[in-house]
Image (tube, helix red, strand yellow):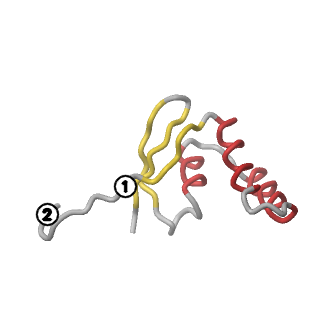
Amino acid sequence: MSRTIVYTYKEEEKRLIFSFDIHRNIHEAVAAAEGIDLTTFLKMEQQVEAVSTCSKAGREYRDSYFRKLGFGKIALAKKENRGVGEK
């Protein structure tokens, strides 16, 4: 099932269709959409998570890294509940 990501990149709001079949998380999806290579980031993120005792360390590292790249808000758009027969 696909969802919509709403994110800001360099102060411009954008939307992107997201599916877990293609990307592991929404951060990887927006980086791929903007053409950003995350290989070094993913290695460092794994190291931070392995070494840290705090469960939030990996998330804080990821958020600060993406802010440095120029990303603002990155979130899944709310689902629209539609009635039967509506498109």
Nearest to the eye among marks 2 and 1: give it. Answer: 1
Q: Given the image, on which type of amino acid does mark 2 rest?
A: Glu
Please tell me the numbered disc located at residue 6.
Answer: none
For the residue pair 42 and 47, the one nearer the viewer reads as 47
Height in image: 4 above or below 73? Answer: below
Farthest residue to the front: give it: 54
Q: Given the image, on which type of amino acid does mark 1 rest?
A: Lys
Percent across and percent down for residue 76 are: 45, 54
Farthest residue to the right: give it: 51
Query: What residue sits right under mark 2 in the picture?
Result: 86
Q: Residue at x 74, y 63 (%)?
A: 55
* Quarter of the image that includes the N terminus: bottom left
Q: Residue at x 80, y 57 (%)?
A: 43
Q: Residue at x 65, y 38 (%)?
A: 67
| Left or right of 22 in this view: 86 | left
Percent across and percent down for residue 59 are: 69, 54
- Ranked by sequence position, the earlier of labels 2 and 1 is 1
Near mark 1 (Cα within 10 A), the count class, few <14, some 14-19 or many ≥20, is few
Query: What residue sits right under mark 1 in the picture?
Result: 78
Near mark 2 (Cα within 10 A), the count class, few <14, some 14-19 or many ≥20, is few
| Left or right of 24 in this view: 47 | right
| Left or right of 14 in this view: 33 | right
Height in image: 21 above or below 59? Answer: below
| Left or right of 78 in this view: 29 | right
The residues tagged by marks 2 and 1 sit, at their Cα atoms, a distance apart of 18 Å
Is label 1 in a helix, a strand or a loop?
loop
Is label 2 in a helix, a strand or a loop?
loop
- Do the residues bearing badges 2 and 1 touch, measured as CB atoms within 8 Å? no
Percent across and percent down for residue 4 are: 40, 54
Q: Residue at x 69, y 35 (%)?
A: 68
